[in-house]
Image (tube, helix red, strand yellow):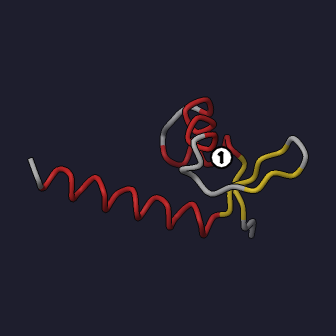
């Protein structure tokens, strides 16, 4: 069982383009590790980030 996603795998998992996910990585919103030129996204940190992001959006929608 892999403990990390490639950028392509993570993008596909949440339904966004790789370029969009690279933008989130550049803005330091998504946890990642860099090994030379390779970027890997730890699954546990990615799931935690998704949960936090979903909670923030739900709170924002509740305020509408």
Residue in view at x 72 percent, y 61 percent = 4
Q: Is residue 42 above or below residue 11?
A: below
Q: Residues within 10 Å of mark 1 (few under 14, many from 20)?
A: some
Image position of 9 (left or right of 57): right
Q: Is residue 21 above or below residue 30?
A: above
Residue in view at x 9 percent, y 47 percent = 64
Image position of 7 (left or right of 34): left
Q: Is residue 16 above or below residue 57?
A: above
**Residue 11 x %, y %:** 58, 42
What residue is disc 1 on?
9
Image position of 41 (left or right of 15): right
Secondary element type, mark 1: helix
**Residue 1 x %, y %:** 74, 70
Q: Quadrant of residue 42?
A: bottom right
**Residue 33 x %, y %:** 76, 56
Q: Is residue 26 above or below residue 44?
A: above
Farthest right residue in view? 36
**Residue 60 x %, y %:** 21, 52
Total number of numbered discs in the rendering? 1
Q: Quadrant of residue 45?
A: bottom right
Image position of 36 (left or right of 43): right
Farthest front residue in view? 27
């Amino acid at each position: 069982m892999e403990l990390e996603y490639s950028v392509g795998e993570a993008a596909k998992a949440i339904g966004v383009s790789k370029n969009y996910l690279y933008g989130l990585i550049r803005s330091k919103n998504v946890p990642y590790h860099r090994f030379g030129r390779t970027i890997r996204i730890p699954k546990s940190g990615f799931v935690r980030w998704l949960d936090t992001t979903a909670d923030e959006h739900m709170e924002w929608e509740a305020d509408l």
